[in-house]
C-alpha cells in the first residue's frame, strides 16, 4: 500500500517535470533583440524561466483558490463537540514545542535568506503529508477507527500549525520592515495573519460552523471539487520546481530537514504521548505515524507564498517522500518492540 502510494506520487511529480521541460505549461516571451542562436545555454535558460512562470501560476492558483476551499470546508464540517482531546494533545503539544524550538534555533542563520525564511524552513521540518500519504496508511493499518482519528488530527493540522507558522512569518516580515513601534508591529502582524489565504478561510469556516447552518449541497459540491484539486496541483508544482531548480547542491540541506521531520519530530511525539498522556494501542500508533509523515506539499506552497527557500522545500519533499517507506516501517517496529 505505501509503495503504491509513493509510486503514484512520483508519477504525478514526474508529470509536472515533463510538462515543464517540454514547455507545455507556457512559453516565456523572447526579449527584444534576443538572438535565436539555438544554443543549449539559451534553451536551458528559457526552460528554467518557463518553469518559474508555470510554478508561480500553479502556486498562486493552489494558494489562493484550492487550499482555501479545502480549509474552509474542513472547518465547516468538523465536529468540535466530540474531539478526542487526549490524542490531540499527545500530538500537538510536542509538535508545537518542537516547531518553536526549530524556528528559534534556525532563525538567525536563515534571516539572511529572507525575513520569512526561518518560518518557511520550519514548515518543511514540521508539516506532514497528512492527506495523500497519511489517510491511506491509516486506513490500511488501522481501519475505520484509525482513519477517523487521523482525519481529526489532519483537520486541526492546518488550523494550529500553519496558523502559528504564518504568524511567525508575518511577525518577522513586520520586524524586517522596521515598523514605527512595537504596537505597530503587532498590528501589522495581526492584520497580515488574519487576511492570509490560509488563516482567513479557517477562521471563516469556524465561524460558519458555529452557526450550525451547514453547507448547501451545491456549495458543498463546489468546495469539494476545488478541494480535490489541491493534491494533484501541488504534486505537479513539485515537478515543475524540480525542472526549475533541480536537486544538485540541495540534498545536504534536505538531509538535515529530513532527519528533523522523519526522526526528531516522531521521537518527540512518541515520548510525550506515551509518558505524559499515557496513550497506547491504536491511538498511540496513529499519533506517531501522523508525526512520522514525509514533508507535505504545503511546505512548497508556503515557500512560494513568501518567495524564499523554494528549491530547499522541493528537495525536502522529494527526499522525505523517498525515505518514508523505510522510516515508517522503522517506527512501526519501534512501536511493536518497545510500546506493545
Image: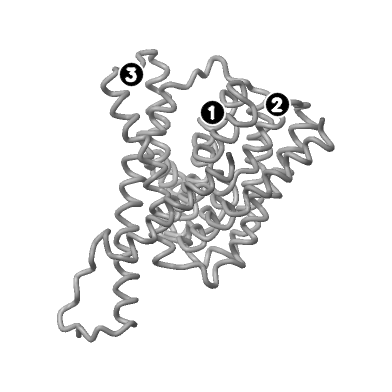
Disc 2: which residue: 282
Residue 277 or 9: which is nearer the viewer?
A: 9
Mark 3 vs mark 2, foreground winner is 2
Task: Please indicate whether residue 22 sits to the left or right of residue 3 in the image.
Answer: left
- Rendered position, 148 above or below 211: below
Write the residue at 42% across / 37% down.
199
Write the residue at 42% across / 32% down.
202
Write the residue at 54% across / 15% down.
81
What is the quadrant of residue 77 in the picture? top left
Image x and y of residue 203, in percent: 41, 30
Quarter of the rendering occupied by the C terminus: top right
Disc 3: which residue: 215
Mark 1 vs mark 2, foreground winner is 2
For residue 41, say whether it is visible. yes
Mark 3, other Cα within 10 Å: few <14 / some 14–19 / many ≥20: some
- Rendered position, 312 above or below 137: below
- Which of the marked residues, 3 or 1, is nearer the chain's N terminus? 1
For residue 179, say whether it is visible. no
Write the residue at 53% across / 31% down.
156
Residues at marks 3 and 1, CA–CA distance in whole angstroms = 19 Å
- Which of the marked residues, 3 or 2, is nearer the chain's N terminus? 3
**For the residue labelled by badge 1, is the local secondary structure a helix, a strand or a loop?**
helix
Image x and y of residue 3, in percent: 58, 45
Quarter of the rendering occupied by the N terminus: top right
Disc 1: which residue: 151
**Given contact means CB atoms under 8 Å apart, are the residues at marks 3 and 1 in contact?**
no
Task: Report the residue that reaches farthest toward the right.
Answer: 338
Task: Please indicate whether residue 159 sits to the left or right of residue 53 in the image.
Answer: right
Image x and y of residue 184, in percent: 43, 48
Residues at marks 1 and 2, CA–CA distance in whole angstroms = 14 Å
Amino acid at each position: 500500500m505505501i509503495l503504491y502510494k509513493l509510486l503514484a506520487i512520483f508519477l504525478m511529480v514526474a508529470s509536472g517535470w515533463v510538462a515543464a521541460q517540454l514547455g507545455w505549461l507556457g512559453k516565456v516571451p523572447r526579449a527584444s533583440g534576443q538572438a535565436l542562436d539555438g544554443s543549449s545555454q539559451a534553451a536551458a535558460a528559457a526552460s528554467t524561466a518557463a518553469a518559474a512562470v508555470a510554478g508561480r501560476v500553479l502556486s498562486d492558483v493552489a494558494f489562493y483558490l484550492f487550499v482555501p476551499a479545502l480549509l474552509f470546508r474542513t472547518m465547516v464540517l468538523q465536529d468540535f463537540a466530540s474531539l478526542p482531546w487526549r490524542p490531540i494533545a499527545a500530538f500537538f503539544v510536542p509538535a508545537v514545542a518542537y516547531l518553536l524550538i526549530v524556528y528559534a534555533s534556525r532563525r538567525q542563520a536563515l534571516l539572511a535568506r529572507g525575513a520569512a525564511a526561518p518560518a518557511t524552513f520550519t514548515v518543511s521540518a514540521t508539516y506532514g503529508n497528512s492527506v495523500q500519504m497519511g489517510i491511506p496508511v491509516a486506513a490500511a493499518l488501522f481501519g475505520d477507527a484509525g482513519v477517523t482519528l487521523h482525519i481529526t488530527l489532519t483537520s486541526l493540522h492546518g488550523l494550529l500549525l500553519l496558523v502559528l507558522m504564518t504568524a511567525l512569518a508575518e511577525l518577522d516580515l513586520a520586524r524586517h520592515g522596521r515598523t514605527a513601534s512595537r504596537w505597530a508591529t503587532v498590528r501589522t502582524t495581526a492584520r497580515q495573519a488574519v487576511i492570509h489565504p490560509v488563516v482567513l478561510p479557517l477562521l471563516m469556516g469556524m465561524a460558519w460552523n458555529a452557526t450550525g447552518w451547514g453547507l448547501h449541497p451545491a456549495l458543498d459540491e463546489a468546495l469539494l471539487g476545488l478541494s480535490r484539486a489541491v493534491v494533484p496541483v501541488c504534486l505537479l508544482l513539485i515537478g515543475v520546481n524540480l525542472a526549475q531548480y533541480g536537486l544538485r547542491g540541495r540534498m545536504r540541506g534536505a538531509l538535515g530537514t529530513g532527519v528533523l521531520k522523519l526522526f526528531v519530530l516522531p521521537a518527540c511525539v512518541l515520548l510525550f504521548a506515551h509518558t505524559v498522556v499515557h496513550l497506547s494501542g491504536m491511538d498511540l500508533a496513529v499519533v506517531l505515524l501522523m508525526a512520522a509523515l514525509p514533508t507535505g506539499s504545503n511546505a512548497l506552497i508556503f515557500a512560494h507564498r513568501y518567495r524564499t527557500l523554494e528549491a530547499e522545500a522541493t528537495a525536502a519533499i522529494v527526499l522525505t517522500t523517498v525515505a518514508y517507506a523505510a522510516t515508517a516501517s522503522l517506527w512501526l517496529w519501534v512501536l511493536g518492540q518497545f510500546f506493545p
